[in-house]
Image (spheres, rainbow, N blue to C red):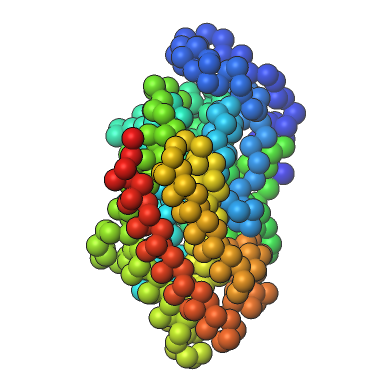
């Protein structure tokens, strides 16, 4: 193990921001939201600090969208109560259907299409922001970490997935950041077959603290002036009812957006999946990859949708309340349709175990046919749900 790792483990002490007026100002500004309800301790070490105990991120826990999964973990660290399903609902990610014709897994990143990201911060009283000047990102990241709030970014390590920065040290007069990614649990010696699919085992000298946070060689991330985001400022929250309206409006908008250069949305995305599953074995094997991931992502999103709606029914009254209850049942039916064909543990969770999907039976010919039929039924249910949602929005009071 590296000397850095040993030092962090040997000499942790409770964080006390002495002689740091900017940090004190920030801590006072966020007292109500973070200091009084902070979930994890902040530990100082090696000229820096880290948030102690942020859990590992991984697929297979019904938190399969890395963007919303990271936000939910970040909010918990900041002491802000918000479930993964609520984040999925407020952001609109629970309604998404996105595909590329080449079935690339990157298609599932929500930012490839329209969503309502700002709605999350607006509902929770957080002014989420980025910093245009990249030279200032590191200093603000350290201030946020010192106050106990992780940083959200894309591509902290390996693939361009959303990740969390949880701490930093100063080594050889340089800042070194470390944190969590959805790839953290993939520890094994790479082979020729798997090395291009999953990352190799992490060297011990790139592991920090007892939390086993991993060095973020990609900090400050991909397109940091846009995608590296901070959550350490407060704003006046909007009502949950208003946030629900924004989410439902986004539900409609997401399926009406035209196709992009590489991506298809809504019903067109369904058609990409359906037509792929209906191909013959040889053509399917050649053209369609990451099938487990795409079905798992859709399954996870629709499950979050019906849970978010179930928890939001009480925000409405009268006919709209009845209609929202009906929409919730429709989204639950979408989940049941997919689960009747393929179990959850053979979808997105496979990304954390066997990279070539050999343990999953999703690619079996008969199952592909059954999935195509389930997706056709779900496509019709999507239309039905959106027709009712439009009625709700037209009668919003």
Residue shown at the point (44%, 65%) measured from the top left: 381
Quadrant in which the C terminus appears: top left
The quarter holding residue 193 reads bottom right
Quadrant in which the N terminus appears: top right
State the image coordinates of residue 321 (x, y, percent, origin top left).
Answer: 46, 43
Left or right of 58? Residue 240 is left
Looking at the image, how many numbered discs can be counted on the residues?
0
Up/down of 283 relative to 177, above or below: below
Left or right of 256? Residue 242 is right
Whether residue 300 can be seen here:
no
State the image coordinates of residue 53 (x, y, percent, origin top left).
Answer: 67, 35
* Residue sitting nearer the eye, 3 or 349: 349
Residue shown at the point (46%, 14%) measured from the top left: 29
Whether residue 309 can be seen here:
yes
The quarter holding residue 227 reads top left
State the image coordinates of residue 217 (x, y, percent, origin top left).
Answer: 50, 46
* Residue sitting nearer the eye, 146 or 320: 320
- The residue at the far right in this view is 10
Up/down of 283 relative to 264, above or below: below
State the image coordinates of residue 190 (x, y, percent, origin top left).
Answer: 64, 67
Residue shown at the point (35%, 67%) measured from the top left: 267
* Residue sitting nearer the eye, 385 or 31: 385
* Residue sitting nearer the eye, 332 or 200: 332
Residue shown at the point (30%, 33%) measured from the top left: 133
């Amino acid at each position: 193990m590296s000397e850095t790792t040993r030092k962090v483990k040997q000499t942790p002490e409770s964080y006390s921001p002495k002689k740091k007026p900017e940090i004190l100002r920030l801590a006072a500004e966020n007292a109500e939201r973070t200091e009084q309800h902070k979930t994890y301790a902040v530990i100082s070490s090696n000229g820096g600090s880290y948030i102690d105990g942020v859990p590992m991120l991984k697929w297979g826990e019904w938190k399969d969208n890395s963007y919303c999964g990271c936000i939910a973990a970040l909010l918990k660290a900041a002491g802000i109560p918000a479930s993964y399903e609520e984040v999925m609902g407020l952001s609109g990610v629970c309604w998404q259907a996105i595909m590329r014709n080449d079935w690339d897994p990157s298609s599932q990143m929500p930012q490839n299409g329209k969503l309502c990201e700002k709605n999350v911060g607006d509902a929770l009283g957080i002014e989420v922001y980025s910093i245009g000047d990249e030279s200032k990102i590191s200093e603000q990241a350290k201030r946020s970490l010192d106050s106990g709030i992780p940083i959200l970014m894309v591509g902290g390590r390996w693939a361009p997935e959303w990740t969390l920065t949880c701490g930093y040290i100063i080594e050889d007069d340089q800042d070194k950041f470390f944190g969590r990614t959805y790839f953290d649990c993939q520890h094994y010696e790479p082979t020729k077959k798997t090395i291009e699919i999953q990352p190799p085992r992490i060297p011990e000298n790139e592991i920090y603290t007892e939390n086993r946070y991993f060095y973020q060689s990609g900090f400050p991330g991909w397109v940091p002036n846009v995608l590296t985001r901070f959550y350490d400022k407060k704003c006046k929250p909007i009502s949950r009812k208003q946030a629900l309206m924004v989410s439902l409006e986004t539900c409609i908008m997401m399926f009406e957006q035209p196709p992009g250069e590489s991506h298809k949305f809504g019903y067109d995305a369904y058609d990409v999946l359906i037509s792929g599953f209906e191909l013959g074995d040889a053509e399917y094997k050649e053209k369609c990859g990451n099938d487990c991931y795409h079905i798992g992502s859709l399954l996870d999103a629709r499950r979050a949708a019906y849970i978010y709606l179930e928890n939001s029914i009480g925000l409405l009254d009268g006919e709209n309340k009845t209609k929202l209850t009906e929409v919730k049942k429709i989204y639950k039916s979408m989940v049941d349709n997919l689960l009747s064909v393929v179990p959850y543990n053979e979808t997105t969770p496979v990304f954390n175990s066997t990279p070539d999907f050999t343990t999953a039976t999703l690619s079996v010919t008969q199952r592909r046919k059954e999935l195509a039929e389930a997706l056709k039924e779900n496509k019709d249910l999507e239309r039905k749900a959106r027709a009712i949602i439009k009625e709700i929005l037209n009668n919003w009071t």
